[in-house]
């Protein structure tokens, strides 16, 4: 298998071939043939000019059609942590991304795909001339290479100097290809200030103008229309719905429909860009519907206007161009180059079609590759055309293919030759940008590996059928035993609430990159538990792999994870419940449904759904310690504390590492007022079997609650310093455990002096504070903002909650208002609102012990407002439920 050309198109094909071969377990020898020193950069991305930006937003430049944020995430990991999908980044960064992504894919495919690099040019391609009927590639260094299939990823036409006059082409200061290495170095030399003429006014001309700009130099640019590309908006506008154009069958109908859409967009959005962007996905279909006559008319009358509106400049580039024009350093002309003559001082006089005469030091051809196969200048495509292996596409543009597979002079598409990108322009028109090329690359890889000769050449010897490994609960896995063992380790870590689950799942997917359930498990724990996982990437890989190798249960698991990650909370919960109804024995799914500690789980877990799920799945688990741990937690939430304690002790006897069982027991001790025993049991477990738990801070928080109830202020402060400072706890956990404990300590008088709530806020991302995704996180964000006295932050959070899900809208938003009155010390206003909200509070999720921070705030507000009788009633009710030395002291000190 060979890929000829390793620019963007060739790199994406090679990437897809590596990953698809691994998923299908198809051994492959892959030849990458290109004289460039590094794959991925090609001509377009090889330069280092910082002012040369991608003319497409970063969010649209991913290598993967099903993972659009991949490039943005790569940038964030490689020195640009604040980049967004709307940004336009330097072109050379994209070249580095392509090279790195291919390199990672090659490493991941080691053992399945063997890659060879041949740094030379292919001059001819003879079908059937190689061994066993393979394609024989003739190389510029005089050697040959055979391949069972070939992808031609280099365009059929190089930049051509056929259009300028012969006298100009022969001049030493004529640059035929501005992207050739070193082509512009002389013109860009600091001492050279001669004027420059650019032939063409498109994006290439813009980049060259920026490179050659300097004081004292005028850059002229000439083209038939004399039009520069339009600029992008700073922030992308949503594309218009243009599907009605698919009913058009003539160019006249399409023009009329586009004009209607543009008029509507200008009236409603004040901008035409949404129409062009809305047309983009349908261009190939519309082009195919046109007759040859209409296509020719489009090229003659409409192509220039389409190109300047479709291929736009980044805003920063447009601003730089505007400055050049205002300063007179960039001038555009409408017309063509008619003649040229050399001047005695080394410059050249260029005559334009309108009679104008320009005297310049340099002329640069910026028109780019020609459209037609007949214009091909490289030996490969010339030889393919002469031999009838490749024939021109519609209107002579590009080559004729059947879905990318080359047609020969007979019209048949049976040769093992494929192409993509620019060579398909006659068939598709829009085919040279990354969004189109990445889709074609995936399709070509699928098609190539489906060819019988390719599969036969790499087929593995037959082997006897072996029993599939399982996930530990009896569910079969479509992977090998080593990957399955790593996967089982990951599940064990999840069930015990121990660190290392993501590391084990990553190990499973590195051992078998085609393991769909392994990738889906990574996405699930990243989404639901906040594990350090690239969730979109893991999800995209799971979706790709599940198409290649998975049984019905595994497909259902991946589908559930997709809906959980991408859908609304309600959609994700419904998908999880449906899956557990079909596969009740899946412990990983059950852990996602009833996590007991994490910030996800079933949305209405405290409305009974979690208990129903745990009971409904009991038979499938047969008394397994994990299921018993969950049942203990459900029982304590139902205030069946004696039964919960028995179940928790039973689970811990079977598996002393069970974090879920210890968590249930911690709640039992707290709600029963058994504070001394609870604190001692937690400390002993944390120092022993719980040493490796992922939620150590939360167990420390539970121990601190016992100390608050025991009225042991010094112990609370010691535990904070040793186990709960932001240096030890970060992210949402710092908000939920460290932040809420500080506020409760201040309310109870256990914390005097400066309260380090600012340190907690610094440890939490702005999104968690101002745009939390769940009501539970939003509740604790409001507590932390109240504790810091940040009234403006509370108002921003309230605004977010009003636009979020129903629970945030109906509970968190009014809670922010009540907390604002606390900050303002308007105690009566705060108390009235908090009293009203308490019955609705269970909807936010979490445990009763976690939500109790709101009741503590209410008690403080009641006393501060002088409503001691109302505070006394609440304290007496609480003491009826559980013993607390602190509550008894507080009750005794209330004024009569």
Image (cartoon, rainbow, N blue to C red):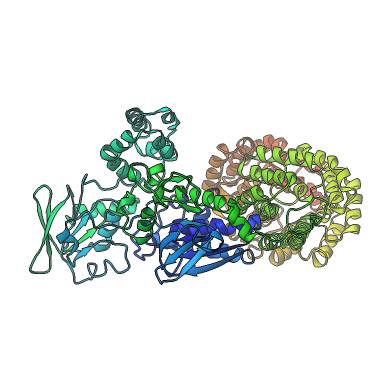
In the picture, measured across the screen, residue 153 lies left or right of residue 657, that is left
**Residue 495: quadrant of the picture:** bottom right
Vertical relation: 611 (above or below) 50: above
Q: Position of residue 728 (x, y in %)?
A: 66, 65
Determine the residue positioned at 67% across, 41% down.
572
In the image, 196 versus 599, the foreground residue is 196
Q: Position of residue 476 (x, y in %)?
A: 79, 51
In the image, 599 versus 306, the foreground residue is 306
In the picture, measured across the screen, residue 450 lies left or right of residue 688, that is left
Residue 82, visible in the rendered structure = no
Determine the residue positioned at 17% across, 65% down.
171
Vertical relation: 536 (above or below) 342: above
In the image, 446 versus 137, the foreground residue is 137
Q: Position of residue 83 (x, y in %)?
A: 46, 56
In the image, 377 versus 635, the foreground residue is 377
In the picture, measured across the screen, residue 508 lies left or right of residue 348, that is right
Which part of the image, by quadrant, shows the C terminus? top right
Q: Position of residue 47 (x, y in %)?
A: 36, 65
Which part of the image, by quadrant, shows the N terminus? bottom right
Residue 738, visible in the rendered structure = yes
Please tell me how many numbered marks the rendered image carries.
0
């Amino acid at each position: 298998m060979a890929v000829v050309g390793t620019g963007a198109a060739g790199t994406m094909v090679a990437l897809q071939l590596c990953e698809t071969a691994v998923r299908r377990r198809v051994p492959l020898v892959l030849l990458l043939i290109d004289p460039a020193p590094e794959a991925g950069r090609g001509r377009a991305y090889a330069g280092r000019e910082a002012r040369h930006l991608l003319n497409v937003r970063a969010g649209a430049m991913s290598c993967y059609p099903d993972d659009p944020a991949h490039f943005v995430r790569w940038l964030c990991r490689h020195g640009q942590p604040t980049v967004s999908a709307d940004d336009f980044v330097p072109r050379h960064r994209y070249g580095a991304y392509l090279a790195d992504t291919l390199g990672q894919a090659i490493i991941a495919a080691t053992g399945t795909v063997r890659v060879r690099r041949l740094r030379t040019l292919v001059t001819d391609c003879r079908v059937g001339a190689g061994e066993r009927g393979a394609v024989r590639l003739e190389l510029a260094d005089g050697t040959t290479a055979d391949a069972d299939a070939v992808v031609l990823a280099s365009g059929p036409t190089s930049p051509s100097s056929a259009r300028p006059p012969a006298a100009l082409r022969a001049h030493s200061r004529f640059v035929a290809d501005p992207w050739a290495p070193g082509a512009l170095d002389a013109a860009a030399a600091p001492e050279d200030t001669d004027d420059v003429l650019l032939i063409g006014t498109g994006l290439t001309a813009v980049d060259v103008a920026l490179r050659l700009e300097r004081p004292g130099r005028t850059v002229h640019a000439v083209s038939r229309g004399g039009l520069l590309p339009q600029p992008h908006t700073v922030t992308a506008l949503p594309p218009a719905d243009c599907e009605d154009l698919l009913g058009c069958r003539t160019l006249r109908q399409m023009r009329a429909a586009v004009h209607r859409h543009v008029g509507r967009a200008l009236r409603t959005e004040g901008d035409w860009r949404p129409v062009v962007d809305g047309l983009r996905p349908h261009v190939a279909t519309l082009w195919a519907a046109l007759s040859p006559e209409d296509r020719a008319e489009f090229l003659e009358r409409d192509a220039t206007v389409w190109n300047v509106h479709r291929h736009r400049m980044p805003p920063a580039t447009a601003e730089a161009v505007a400055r050049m024009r205002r300063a007179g350093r960039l001038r555009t002309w409408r017309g063509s180059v008619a003649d040229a003559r050399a001047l005695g001082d080394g410059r050249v006089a260029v005559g334009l079609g309108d009679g104008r005469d320009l005297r310049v030091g340099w002329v640069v051809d910026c028109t780019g590759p020609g459209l037609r196969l007949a214009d091909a200048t490289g030996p490969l495509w010339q030889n393919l055309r002469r031999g009838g292996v490749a024939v021109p596409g519609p209107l002579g543009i590009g080559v004729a293919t059947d879905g990318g597979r080359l047609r020969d002079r007979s019209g048949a598409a049976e040769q093992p030759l494929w192409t993509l990108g620019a060579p398909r322009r006659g068939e598709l028109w829009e085919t040279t940008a990354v969004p189109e090329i990445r889709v074609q690359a995936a399709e070509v890889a699928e098609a190539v590996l489906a060819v019988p000769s390719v599969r036969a050449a790499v087929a593995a010897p037959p082997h006897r059928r072996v029993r599939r490994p399982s996930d530990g609960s009896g569910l079969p896995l479509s992977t090998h035993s080593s990957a399955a063992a790593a996967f089982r380790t990951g599940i064990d870590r999840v069930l015990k609430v121990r660190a290392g689950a993501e590391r084990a799942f990553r190990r499973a997917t590195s051992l078998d990159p085609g393991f769909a359930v392994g990738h889906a498990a990574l996405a699930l724990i990243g989404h639901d538990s906040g594990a350090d996982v690239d969730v979109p990437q893991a999800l995209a890989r799971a979706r790709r792999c599940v198409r290649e190798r998975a049984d019905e249960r595994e497909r259902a698991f991946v589908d559930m994870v997709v809906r959980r990650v991408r859908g609304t909370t309600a959609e994700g919960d419904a998908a999880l419940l449906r899956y557990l109804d079909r596969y009740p024995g899946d412990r990983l799914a059950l852990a996602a449904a009833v996590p007991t500690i994490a910030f996800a789980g079933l949305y209405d877990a405290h409305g009974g759904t979690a208990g129903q799920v745990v009971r409904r799945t009991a038979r499938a688990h047969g008394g397994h310690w994990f299921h018993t741990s969950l049942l203990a937690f459900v029982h304590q939430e139902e205030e069946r504390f004696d039964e919960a304690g028995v179940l928790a002790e039973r689970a811990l006897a079977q598996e002393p590492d069970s974090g879920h069982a210890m968590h249930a027991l911690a709640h039992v001790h707290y709600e029963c007022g058994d504070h001394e025993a609870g604190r001692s049991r937690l400390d002993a477990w944390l120092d022993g079997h719980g040493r490796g738990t992922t939620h150590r801070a939360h167990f420390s928080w539970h121990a601190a609650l016992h100390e608050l109830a025991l009225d042991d202020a010094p112990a609370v402060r010691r535990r904070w310093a040793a186990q709960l400072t932001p240096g030890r706890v970060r992210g949402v956990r710092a908000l939920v455990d460290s932040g809420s404990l500080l506020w409760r300590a201040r309310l109870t008088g256990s914390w005097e002096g400066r309260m380090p709530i600012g340190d907690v806020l610094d440890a939490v991302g702005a999104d968690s504070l101002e745009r939390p995704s769940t009501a539970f996180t939003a509740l604790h964000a409001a507590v932390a903002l109240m504790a810091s006295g940040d009234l403006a932050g509370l108002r921003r959070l309230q605004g977010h909650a009003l636009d979020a899900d129903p629970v945030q809208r109906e509970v968190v938003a009014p809670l922010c208002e009540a907390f604002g009155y606390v900050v303002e010390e308007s105690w009566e206003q705060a108390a009235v609102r908090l009293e009203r909200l308490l019955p609705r509070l269970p909807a936010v999720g979490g445990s009763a012990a976690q939500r109790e921070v709101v009741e503590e705030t209410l008690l403080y507000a009641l006393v501060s407002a002088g409503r001691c009788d109302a505070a006394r009633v609440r304290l007496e009710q609480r003491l009826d439920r559980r013993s607390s030395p602190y509550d008894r002291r507080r009750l005794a000190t209330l004024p009569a």
